Amino acid sequence: MKKLKVILYFPPDKTDRPFSYYLVKDYDLVFNILQAEVQPGKRGRLTVELEGTEENIERALEFARQNGVEYRPFNKNIVRNQGECMDCGACIAICPSGALYMDPIDWKLYFDESKCLVCELCLRACPVKAIDVNMFV
Amino acid sequence: MGKTFQEINEKIRTGEVVVATAEEIIDIVKEEGIKEAARKVDVVTTATFGPMCSSGAFVNFGHSDPPIRMNKVWLNDVPAYGGIAAVDAYIGATELSESRGLEYGGAHVIEDLVAGKKVRLRAKSYGTDCYPRLDVDTFITLEDLNQAYLFNPRNVYQNYSAATNTSDQIIDTYMGTLLPRCGNVTYSTSGELSPLLNDPEFRTIGIGTRIFLAGTQGYIAWEGTQFVRNKVEIEDGVTMYSGGTLAVIGDLKDMNTRYLRAASFARYGTTMFVGIGIPIPVLDEEMMEYLAVTNRDIYTGVVDYSVPKRSKPTLRRVNYEELRSGSIELEGKKIPTAPLSSLNRAREIANVLKESIERGEFFLQEPVQMMPTKREFKPLKDVGVE
């Protein structure tokens, strides 16, 4: 089994189709939506984590391409500089997914990258700039 | 049975002193009772590490040759106040860089100095017979300065309102980023570990009290600005204290950036996280009663920061146990809460202070003058000039 985070771009005329249904049903993928911007009549964007066999993921992405849905690997992540962090908590106030959280025993800040949506709100909230966004290819 | 400052200092000298942090004392009192805890424990350490805008440092640069009477001063492009003697200046934490804006301010200059970095000094003068030089542009380090001392007019807020936002827009405040429609609540005190909530009547904390200030030993210089004594009985046996503040002073040259951090809040500006620890002597059982306070008995208000007025509406009263739980109820909804001051680092300070007392390196200083009992919190009489 393989996990892959991708961003899917839907042309305006494709946002009304139950695309994720086909991915689940025909390709047996576990499908976790991390972030969605889908409005009727507009270009849609869906950040998803796909889990399945390598072959099924490849076939599913080929199916997407043939249907006019473009995709690219999710190539950003949030990096926390532990040395700079003061464990204050300003970032957990705005983290929508709970990826940044405080342990209620030691009151240190922890970051669970698997939950991160890379919405980047924490970059603005951190008072000591201990959070950065990392681009990779 | 009582203890005096002198008796406790003697125990520090002989190594017999028993010290607990303000969190540890809660369990000690639970297990052994007020009376026994007051007999056994001599000093309780309290601490806080949060953003405190009213911070800054006095510096003396030394004289150049020919000398200059600096009347305009910039440190790394941040204006410092030069309207004092020739080469003295005050660099305030919230003053912003003229080239970098909200990202970098006086707080960052102070942190850079403490970190040993070179800081660019620019100064201008109108020139006098005794100070003929008109400008200077050079680099300085903390080591080069004759004096550099932190002097913070208002730190260690006794208690502070929690913040939320009822409007439909995200707002950026000194209480952090507040999400629309009460999307979050932020708060900023160390609660049961906080200095002025453990001596709410100022029985032991006054002018002259020796404190842990950003890694070194400093002093309480005066009442803090806007000092008031608010005391409201809210239910049987529970009193809500707020309004106490402290002016503190200490040698910047001995400070540590672990406990003195520059910060920048989005669309607000710069401020400084200041680590302060205050040792409280257990003079008697009454003092121990105050020191045993828990988050359950410390209350604050949740204030709506979307109202751009001096008096902002308070939506509800809440205790720190609930704030610390990660969410509170507000108008029937569960709202996530987040701290802005670091409890983890405050605990570290309370422990560092505890250990230095146990090692006989930190002695208690009895106040030379107590804090005022009556002060008014007056608004600005904005009467105009007509």
Image: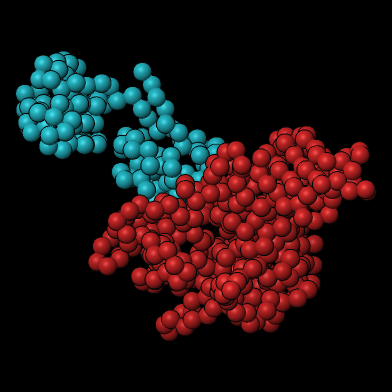
Chain colours: A cyan, B red
* Nearest to the observer: residue A74 or residue B33: A74
- How many numbered discs, if any? 0
Q: Position of residue B124 (x, y in %)?
A: 78, 43
Q: Which of the image's four quarters has the N terminus of chain B?
A: bottom right
Quadrant location of residue B296? bottom left
Vertical side of B313 occupied by B285: above or below = below
* Nearest to the observer: residue B90 or residue B354: B90
Q: Position of residue B106 (x, y in %)?
A: 64, 47
Residue lying at the far front of the rendered structure: B386
Q: Residue at x 78, y 73 (%)?
A: B368
Vertical side of B285 occupied by B347: above or below = above
The answer to whether B378 appears left or right of B116 in the picture is left
Q: Position of residue B222 (x, y in %)?
A: 72, 69
Quadrant location of residue B116? top right
Residue lying at the far right of the rendered structure: B130
* Nearest to the observer: residue B386 or residue A73: B386
Q: Position of residue B214 (x, y in %)?
A: 67, 52
The answer to whether A63 appears left or right of B215 in the picture is left
Asked whether residue B111 is in view, the answer is: no
Q: Which of the image's four quarters has the C terminus of chain B?
A: bottom right
Asked whether residue A133 is in view, the answer is: yes
Q: Residue at x 60, y 79 (%)?
A: B376
Q: Residue at x 37, y 48 (%)?
A: A94
* Nearest to the observer: residue B90 or residue B116: B90
The answer to whether B114 appears left or right of B10 in the picture is left
Q: Residue at x 71, y 65 (%)?
A: B220
Vertical side of A17 occupied by B162: above or below = below
